[in-house]
Image (cartoon, grey):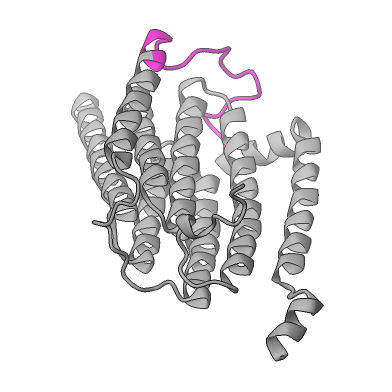
């Protein structure tokens, strides 16, 4: 409990930045999805830190809901990815230009 | 005497934080730099465990357990299943860059995001708000008890909405996993 909350917040910001950069530079859809998970985890860490700093259980409750939403998001997202790449080889975002006008 | 004990506890806490932070950042860099998606998934597990340790260090014991069970146990396994299923477990050429200047731009944007967040957080003294508005998090009592009390009283309606959300996700996954009949005929022909 002695580590100052600001350290955790900085770590969360760094983790979020890494996730965002990864989302922008990677082309594999699955890795992009993992980067989204990294960003979600950074925000979860921030929420738990706020819960400790403000002595408020609400931050931890929010993390609980984020976990549920992340699980649902992964299930549906991976379902979509599987149904797209069942028909075509190569799981990069560049291959998905079928919606291009 | 108690002063030395406190100092030792503080050092241990800081050590735990530093080790976890190094593990988290190494895992995060591994996720975005590994050529093989399977390696990315395993690096993701490393990051998730580090975050779970930091949850424990901040007295969020229930969330740490859920983090390990749901994230490392279910979500990453799902990722690995999909990697095997659609067969993208081969190395990706990271050198090839179809869009020129995408990576420097992305890195610059990331640094910009980081400094913006830091400036905002610093200008607001890291955390603002009314303390203990939804119930205390620290102090005596079990973390699970406090969290459960909060979820089943203050946040009861959102909790029930998450149940609906999970049902929708399950139904959606089943619908997405089904092959449309027309496509099945084409494949058989």
Foreground of the two, B95 or B81: B95
> Looking at the image, which residue is at 45% across and 41% down?
A39
Q: Is residue B130 one of those drawn in magenta?
A: yes
Left or right: residue B72 compared with residue B37: right
Q: Residue placed farthest to the top in the image?
A: B123
Across and down, in percent, residue B136 comes to 59, 25
> Looking at the image, which residue is at 51% across and 31% down?
A47
Q: Main secondary structure of the magenta part?
A: loop
**Residue B162 vertical position relative to residue B9 in the rendered view, above or below:** below
Left or right: residue B132 compared with residue A42: right
Q: Is residue B59 visible?
A: no
Foreground of the two, A22 or A66: A22
Quadrant in the rendering for residue B46: bottom left
> Looking at the image, which residue is at 50% across and 38% down?
A44
- The magenta span reads B120-141
Across and down, in percent, residue B143 comes to 56, 40
Quadrant in the rendering for residue B184: bottom right
Left or right: residue B82 compared with residue B5: right
């Amino acid at each position: 409990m002695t580590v100052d909350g600001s350290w955790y917040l900085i770590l969360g910001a760094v983790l979020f930045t890494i996730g965002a950069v990864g989302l922008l530079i990677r082309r594999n859809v699955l890795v992009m999805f993992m980067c989204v998970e990294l960003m979600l985890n950074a925000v979860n860490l921030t929420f738990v830190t706020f819960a400790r700093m403000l002595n408020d259980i609400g931050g931890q409750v929010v993390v609980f809901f984020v976990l549920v939403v992340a699980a649902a998001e992964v299930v549906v997202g991976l379902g979509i990815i599987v149904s797209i790449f069942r028909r075509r080889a190569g799981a990069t975002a560049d291959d998905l230009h079928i919606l291009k006008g | 005497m108690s002063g030395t004990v406190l100092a030792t506890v503080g050092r241990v806490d800081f050590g735990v934080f530093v080790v976890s932070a190094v593990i988290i950042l190494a895992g995060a860099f591994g996720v975005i730099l590994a050529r093989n998606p399977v390696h990315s998934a395993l690096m993701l597990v490393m990051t998730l465990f580090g975050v779970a340790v930091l949850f424990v260090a901040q007295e969020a014991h229930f969330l740490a357990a859920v983090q390990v069970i749901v994230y490392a146990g279910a979500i990453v396994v799902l990722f690995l299943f999909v990697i095997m299923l659609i067969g993208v477990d081969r190395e990706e050429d990271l050198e090839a860059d179809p869009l020129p200047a995408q990576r420097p731009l992305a890195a610059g944007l990331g640094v910009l995001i980081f400094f913006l967040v830091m400036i905002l957080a610093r200008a607001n003294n890291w955390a603002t708000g009314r303390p203990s508005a939804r119930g205390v998090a620290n102090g005596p009592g079990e973390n699970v008890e406090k969290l459960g009390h909060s979820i089943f009283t203050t946040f009861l309606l959102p909790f029930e909405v998450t149940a609906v959300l999970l049902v929708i996700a399950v139904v959606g996954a089943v619908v997405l996993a089904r092959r449309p009949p027309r496509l099945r005929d084409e494949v058989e022909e």
